[in-house]
Image (cartoon, rainbow, N blue to C red):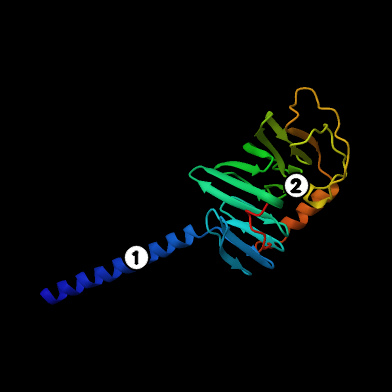
């Protein structure tokens, strides 16, 4: 009897150990569900320190700054991103808040639902997403857009799939499908040409600043205009790479001026 009792106890210990191992592995997989998919090379930074250089799929360490050489896709639990070549950005998630920091370049995004409060943060200001309104009759049930940052301005555009209610320094506004907003430190007017491309894809042209618009400070401007054909094509190309995504990065330290 004692022999069989010991056998049963040992069997229970083995079963418990195996169950614990399986749960631990499952938790580890869940914790590492954020992934990066570079097409060429991506460099990850913490401050000025390089914490990783990847040329193939890998887990995304929380809070790391991503510098791309070629395109790089990032898959999160509720968000899919594609950073264009030589873009610098990072994703930070804390509790019920997630922030996408874009320091330079263009980052395309695609999502069907925001599980947390979300904000786009650029050198020219932050844009907090209040609500996503999906157009169920179009596309694959997701909204697609981009954030582009250059030396002179930052812009957020929605290409298709619905609209976004956002909060900026000028208050609450809605970005409809096919529209964009531009954040700029310089004086600028309202109304953008239909064929204007994303800021990261065009060379800045020298021009005389127009007269400040009534009700807007001269320090920072927010312009609202139409999304050009080039911008929509860029989003389609960037987000059309499938699950693996296109990836890329550049050896540009995020702290470099």
> Residue, x 72% and y 44% (percent of image)?
161
Badge 1 marks a residue whose secondary structure is helix
Could you tell me residue 178's position as x and y percent? 79, 41
Near mark 1 (Cα within 10 A), the count class, few <14, some 14-19 or many ≥20, is few
Q: Which one is nearer the viewer's eye here, 69 or 256? A: 256
Is residue 25 shown to the viewer in this render? yes
* SS at badge 2: loop
Along the line of sight, the residue nearer the viewer: 15 or 189: 189
Label 1 or label 2, whichever lies nearer to me, is 2
Q: Which residue is found at the position 28% from the left and 71% from the top?
A: 14
Q: Are marks 1 and 2 in contact (CB under 8 Å)?
A: no
Toward which corner of the image does residue 44 lie, by quadrant? bottom right
Which one is earlier in the sequence, the residue at label 1 or at label 2? 1
Q: Residues within 10 Å of mark 2 (few under 14, many from 20)?
A: some
The CA span between labels 1 and 2 is 54 Å
* Residue at the spot 31% in from the left edge and 68% down from the top edge: 17
Coordinates of residue 250 in the picture (x, y in percent): 69, 62
Instruction: Look at 39% across and 63% down and name the residue there.
Output: 24
Among the 4 quarters of the image, the one containing residue 251: bottom right
Give the vertical position of 72 relative to 153 (above or below): below
Outermost residue, bottom side: 3
- Mark number, residue 151: 2
Q: Quadrant of the N terminus?
A: bottom left
* Residue 93 image position (x, y, % from top left): 53, 48
> Horizontal and vertical percent for residue 77?
56, 53
Q: Specify the farthest residue to the left.
A: 1
Above or below, 72 against 214 in this view is below
Q: Nearer the viewer, residue 30 or 247?
A: 247
Q: Is residue 92 left or right of residue 191?
A: left
User: Which residue matches tag 1?
Assistant: 19
Q: Is residue 1 visible?
A: no
In the picture provided, is 100 more to the left or to the right than 154? left
């Amino acid at each position: 009897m004692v022999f069989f009792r010991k056998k049963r106890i040992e069997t229970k210990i083995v079963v418990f150990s195996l169950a614990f191992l399986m749960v631990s592995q499952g938790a580890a997989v869940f914790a590492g569900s954020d992934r990066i998919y570079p097409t060429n090379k991506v460099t990850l930074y913490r401050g000025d320190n390089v914490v990783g250089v990847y040329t193939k799929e890998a887990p995304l360490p929380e809070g790391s700054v991503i510098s791309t050489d070629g395109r790089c896709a990032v898959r999160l639990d509720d968000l899919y991103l594609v950073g264009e070549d030589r873009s610098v950005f990072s994703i930070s998630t804390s509790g019920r808040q997630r922030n996408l920091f874009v320091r330079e370049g263009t980052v395309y995004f695609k999502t069907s639902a925001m599980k947390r409060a979300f904000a786009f943060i650029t050198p020219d200001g932050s844009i907090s997403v209040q609500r996503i309104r999906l157009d169920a009759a179009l596309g694959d049930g997701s909204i697609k857009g981009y954030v582009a940052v250059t030396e002179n301005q930052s812009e957020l555009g929605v290409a298709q799939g619905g609209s976004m209610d956002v909060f900026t320094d000028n208050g609450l506004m809605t970005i409809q499908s096919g529209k964009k907003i531009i954040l700029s430190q310089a004086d600028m007017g309202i109304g953008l040409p239909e064929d204007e491309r994303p800021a990261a894809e065009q060379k800045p042209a020298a021009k005389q600043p127009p007269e400040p618009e009534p009700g807007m400070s001269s320090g920072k401007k927010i312009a609202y205009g139409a999304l050009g054909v080039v911008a929509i094509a860029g989003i389609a190309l960037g987000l059309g790479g499938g699950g693996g995504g296109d990836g890329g990065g550049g050896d540009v330290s995020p702290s470099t001026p």
